Image: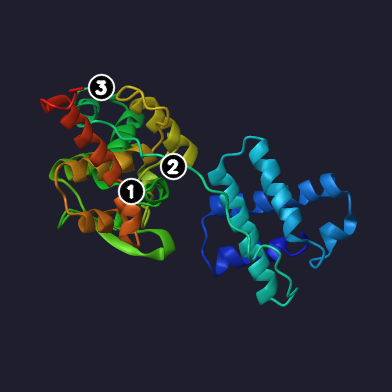
């Protein structure tokens, strides 16, 4: 697989497809891993330099090797998707008319139910557990509350800036995947805490108060918050509310959707709030609700445990 066109491909994804930086890095890493595998396994310079030399069985052997090494099947599927996209790019740019990945399919993987935090522990976390009174504590609290109250993706939360907030009608405007825009309502309590946080942020970092459109969430040094910091904040506080194995920011998006469903919210409304392009992705959350109903039935029905 020729890597000399890889920079062109990454540039294409950045400028024309507007992929996020972490997605670009993942694609670049995946394709470089394939090149390394071909070099070490087949030791054939032609295979890594000539687009016509790569065959489907080379790719299949790589996928099998990944699975045998313990790579999650979801990750294997992503790596194949990166390769398919790269081959299509080479075809469109007339670097080659050969596409060895065209008819390959990703390995099947089990679909796991999305975890979520129960309502009472979540409310206890936000209302009763003491966040520190300094700037970092107030920032951490508003980050957790926004994730829980809006269902935003991590990247969407980190992209928030002051101009996206509309306190006149208690909403925020977000640009999600594929540059699709949506408007999300904010609860009065969340608006109040947001206004208090912004005031504290501006007093703590006067240069941000004078900026045209500063980032909403920032580090202790006044710079835009980065993904790793948000992950640390989420895992630190969610450990106080749940024993779930995964306690990253995305758990709060699952919690937002699941609790709305449990309270009878319309599935289409939840779809719009989450920014899903179709109902199929949103319906995944109904599995949690069905499981909860099944558990309640087993506990309450007189015949549920009859032999």
Query: Residue 183's x, y, as percent?
Result: 25, 59
* 280 relative to 62 in the view: left or right: left
Near-viewer residue (87 or 136): 87
The mark tally for this picture is 3
Label 3: few (<14), some or many (≥20) within 10 Å?
Answer: few
Residues at marks 2 and 1 touching, judged by CB atoms closer than 8 Å:
no
Query: Residue 248's x, y, as percent?
Result: 41, 35
The residue depicted at 32 percent of the width and 28 percent of the height is 137
The residue depicted at 57 percent of the width and 39 percent of the height is 72
Query: Residue 78's x, y, as percent?
Result: 57, 51
Earlier-in-chain disc, 3 versus 2? 3
Task: Check disc 3 and report the residue beneath it.
Answer: 130
Q: Tell me the distance, in whole angstroms, between the alpha carbons under discs 2 and 1.
A: 30 Å
The residue depicted at 67 percent of the width and 37 percent of the height is 68
Task: Check disc 1 and report the residue beneath it.
Answer: 284
Q: Which mark is residue 225?
A: 2
| Residue 198 seen in the figure | no
* 231 relative to 267 in the view: left or right: right
Earlier-in-chain disc, 2 versus 1? 2
Query: Residue 282's x, y, as percent?
Result: 31, 53
**Which residue is the extreme one toward the front?**
307
Circle 1 SS class: loop
The residue depicted at 85 percent of the width and 49 percent of the height is 42
**Closer to us: mark 2 or mark 1?**
1
Near-viewer residue (172 or 86): 86
């Amino acid at each position: 697989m020729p890597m000399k066109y890889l920079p062109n491909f990454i540039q294409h994804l950045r400028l024309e497809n507007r992929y996020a930086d972490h997605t670009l890095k993942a694609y670049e890493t995946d394709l470089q891993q394939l090149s390394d595998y071909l070099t070490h396994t087949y030791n054939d310079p032609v295979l890594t330099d000539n687009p016509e030399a790569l065959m489907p069985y080379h790719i299949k052997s790589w996928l099998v090797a990944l699975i045998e090494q313990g790579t999650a099947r979801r990750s294997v599927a992503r790596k194949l998707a990166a390769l398919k996209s790269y081959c299509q790019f080479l075809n469109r740019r007339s670097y080659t008319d050969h596409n060895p990945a065209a008819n390959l399919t990703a390995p099947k993987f089990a679909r796991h139910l999305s975890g979520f935090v129960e309502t009472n522990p979540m409310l206890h976390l936000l209302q009763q557990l003491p966040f520190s009174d300094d700037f970092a504590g107030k920032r951490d609290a508003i980050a957790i509350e926004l994730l829980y109250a809006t269902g935003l993706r991590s990247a969407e939360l980190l992209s928030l800036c002051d101009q996206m907030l509309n306190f006149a009608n208690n909403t925020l405007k977000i640009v999600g995947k594929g540059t699709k825009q949506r408007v999300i309502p904010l609860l009065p309590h969340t608006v109040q805490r947001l206004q208090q946080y912004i005031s504290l942020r501006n007093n703590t970092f006067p240069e941000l108060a004078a900026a045209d459109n500063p980032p909403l969430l920032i580090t202790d040094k006044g710079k835009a918050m980065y993904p790793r910091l948000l992950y640390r904040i989420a895992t630190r506080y969610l450990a106080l509310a749940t024993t779930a194995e995964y306690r990253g920011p995305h758990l709060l998006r699952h919690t937002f959707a699941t609790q709305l469903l449990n309270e009878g919210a319309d599935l289409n409304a939840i779809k719009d709030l989450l920014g899903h392009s179709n109902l199929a992705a949103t319906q995944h959350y109904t599995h949690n609700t069905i499981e909860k109903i099944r558990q309640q039935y087993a506990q309450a029905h007189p015949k549920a445990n009859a032999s």
